[in-house]
Image: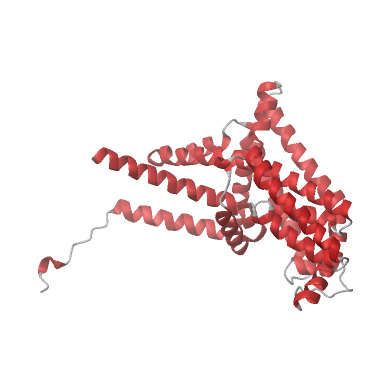
């Protein structure tokens, strides 16, 4: 039988209401200004990645913090510009033949080809159309210019955050209220340490695997060795599974030329996968810096679906940040439980 005391009175304080309102406002701001917010995140990530090099130049070589930061950023810009000017034309030249060849192999084996790829008539315009998901060339050019502006903005943010030691942490201290400063800084410090080590080690692993695959495919005579090497370096973000995915692509490319060559390619990638799992990753990364394959896959897919290429870049870092937040909350809960005993 229901009585008058069956229902509990729920009271919501003005403080809780304002917190909820501010949270919704921040979520809406991030949603509508995602491009600007993503540029800030990229700048923070790059500044964390280059921090060891900037510190080395400023503290060990006595270059000074400002000059060291400017030198590192200029070096990154020079590498990026050289890659666009020298490597990108070669990549696009090979990519047209690679996609056509890969689609032909899929069609001959599984009777299914890549959508939008016409074998034998696949040039630069078709490559852009395929990569852009059917968008017109003018819209793609417009997106490229917008991306250049965003990249330039990310470079400026990286420079400002790198000029001052622990620039990102100090930025958070400025904008955060006093009541939130301690927990947020604790979470960010743990995230920064983990991501800095992960970024450096992941770069070494990706470059090593990419170079080995590209050189190995070229020596074996497999076509489109440059594309396969780039794919191997990119897929290396997903540990263990990455070499398997690239090996499957290499098999489909090589089998149309020779069955023996395809078998050799599979054996080569098996050796690469064993080298990665038992030598390279334990030596460079260690167990503490590895990102779980499931987290990496889900974060990359979710990032690609939500924000495209920028989402792919930020997918793993955001997943690691969420993981650090959950770890912090779990530690605080355990600490309160110990105090209550």
The quarter of the picture where residue 11 lies is bottom left
Quadrant including the C terminus: top left
Q: How is the image coloured?
A: secondary structure
Q: Where is residue 290 in the image (x, y as percent from the top left)?
A: 58, 45
Of 105 and 116, the residue lying toward us: 105
Q: Quadrant where the N terminus lies?
A: bottom left
- Residue found at x 31% / y 51%: 15
- The image quadrant of residue 202 is top right
Quick check: 145 above or below 112? Answer: above
Q: Can residue 322 be seen in this view?
A: yes
**How many numbered marks does the figure carry?**
0
Decide if residue 302 is on the left or right side of residue 202.
left
- Find residue 248 and report its horizontal and vertical position in percent: 74, 62
Residue 189 is situated, as x and y percent measured from the top left of the image, at 50, 37
* Residue 119: x %, y % from top left: 86, 74
For the point 33% across and 56% down, the residue is 17
> Residue at 67% of width from left, 58% of height from top?
309
Q: In the image shown, does 193 or 283 lie closer to the viewer?
A: 283
Which of the pair 50/40 is nearer the observer?
A: 50
Q: Is residue 37 visible?
A: no
Identify the residue at horizontal 41%, vertical 37% (top origin): 182
Task: Using the image, determine if residue 196 lies above or below residue 56.
Answer: below
Nearest the camera: 44 or 257?
257
């Amino acid at each position: 039988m229901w009585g008058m005391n069956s229902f509990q009175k729920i009271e919501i304080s003005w403080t809780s209401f304002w917190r909820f309102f501010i949270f919704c406002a921040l979520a809406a701001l991030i949603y509508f200004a995602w491009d600007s917010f993503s540029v800030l995140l990229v700048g923070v990530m790059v500044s964390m990645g280059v921090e060891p090099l900037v510190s080395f130049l400023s503290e060990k070589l006595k270059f000074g913090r400002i000059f060291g930061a400017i030198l590192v950023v200029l070096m990154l810009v020079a590498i990026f510009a050289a890659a666009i000017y020298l490597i990108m034309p070669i990549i696009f030249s090979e990519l047209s033949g690679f996609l056509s060849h890969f689609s032909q192999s899929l069609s001959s084996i599984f009777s299914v080809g890549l959508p939008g790829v016409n074998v034998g008539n696949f040039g630069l315009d078709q490559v852009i159309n395929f990569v852009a998901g059917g968008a017109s060339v003018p819209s793609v050019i417009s997106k490229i210019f917008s991306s250049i502006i965003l990249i330039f903005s990310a470079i400026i943010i990286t420079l400002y955050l790198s000029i001052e030691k622990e620039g990102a942490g100090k930025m958070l201290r400025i904008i955060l209220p006093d009541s939130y400063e301690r927990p947020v800084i604790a979470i960010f410090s743990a995230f920064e340490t983990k991501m800095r080590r992960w970024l450096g080690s992941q770069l070494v692993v990706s470059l090593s695997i990419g170079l080995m695959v590209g050189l190995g495919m070229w020596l074996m005579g497999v076509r489109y060795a440059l594309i396969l090497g780039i794919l191997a370096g990119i897929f290396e973000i997903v540990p263990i599974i990455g070499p398997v995915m690239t090996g499957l692509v290499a098999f489909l490319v090589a089998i149309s030329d020779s069955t023996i060559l395809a078998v050799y390619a599979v054996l080569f990638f098996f050796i690469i996968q064993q080298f990665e799992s038992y030598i390279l990753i334990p030596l460079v990364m260690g167990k503490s810096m590895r990102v779980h394959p499931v987290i990496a896959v889900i974060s990359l897919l979710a990032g690609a679906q939500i924000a495209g290429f920028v989402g792919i870049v930020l997918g793993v870092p955001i997943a690691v940040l969420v993981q650090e937040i959950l770890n912090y909350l779990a530690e605080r809960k355990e600490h309160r439980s110990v105090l209550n005993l």
